[in-house]
Image: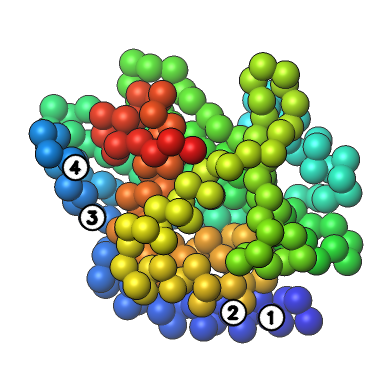
Amino acid sequence: MEMSKRTCFLKALFVLLPLVVAGSSLSAVQSQPAGKEEHTVKTEAINAAKAKAHLESEVKTNKKTKKMQEHLQGKGFKPANGEKDFFAQKTNYIDAKGQDVQIEVYVQNFVKGKSKNKVAQGQVVVTKKGTPRTTYDFYLDAVDGDFQGNIEEYYIDDATNTVKKANSWWSCVKAKIQNKCSTTCVGALVTCIGAPDWSSYLLCVSLKCGSCWLKWTACCTCNCSWSCEWACGCCKR
């Protein structure tokens, strides 16, 4: 039943894909606040195999990613590894001087028996030449499977090295969409709630929002303390 639901949802979603891509080409030029130059924004989807390989590698080499996964597994959740269980994208910002900052977003669904909760582990990666690679690990839990209801977010606290509740990346993105994007994009937060899991929900919202999604996912990824602020602005999480 769950697979049939996912199949129907994705078939309906991909009817929209040519229209959305034609409108935004999944790339755009974003205007920066007064006094800043425009920067070219380019983005591309990362396929499931590459996303899976990346996250598996991070679990082995990144203590925070490993701790987050162990935390989820301790709660009885296991990583789902199907082709549709990943949402991943890479965005590059290039300024007039040729400087580049790359932002990657990875999300993987987690499942637990008959649990209604829709859970996913995520990571954002910021890379800029000449600066240390920065990662931010989190997980999202749509309690009772309701994307419009109680969504809990967690991250790894640096000071205590423990998993803590937070208003994080998704809270920031959602708030910016609601306040800064078009009616169609805002509506996607509701019209996409039929998605069977986080990867499908985020894909649906990103396709309907186009360039506005790119702008605010980047801004919320850049937490005003990272080196990406000069390229895409930053949003306090």
Q: Amino acid at mark 1?
A: Lys
Which numbered marker is on residue 32? 4
Q: Earlier in the sequence, mark 2 or mark 3?
A: 2
How far apart are the alpha carbons under marks 4 and 3? 12 Å
Q: Amino acid at mark 4?
A: Gln
Residue 48 percent location from the top left of the image: 58, 54
Mark 3 vs 1: CB contact within 8 A:
no
Q: Earlier in the sequence, mark 4 or mark 1?
A: 1
SS under mark 2: helix
Q: Which residue is mark 3?
A: 28
Which numbered marker is on residue 226? none
Mark 1 vs 2: CB contact within 8 A:
yes
**Residue displayed at 66% across by 64% down:** 149
Residue 52 percent location from the top left of the image: 63, 46
SS under mark 1: helix
Residue 12 percent location from the top left of the image: 51, 83
- Is 154 displayed left or right of 9 in the figure? right
Crowdedness of circle 3 by 10 Å Cα count: few (<14), some, many (20+)?
some
How far apart are the alpha carbons under marks 1 and 2? 6 Å
- Is 199 displayed left or right of 70 in the figure? left
Is 20 above or below relative to 120? below
Q: Earlier in the sequence, mark 3 or mark 1?
A: 1
Q: Amino acid at mark 3?
A: Ala
How far apart are the alpha carbons under marks 2 and 3? 27 Å
> Would you identify the image quadrant in which residue 86 lies?
bottom right
How far apart are the alpha carbons under marks 4 and 1? 41 Å
**Residue displayed at 59% across by 60% down:** 199
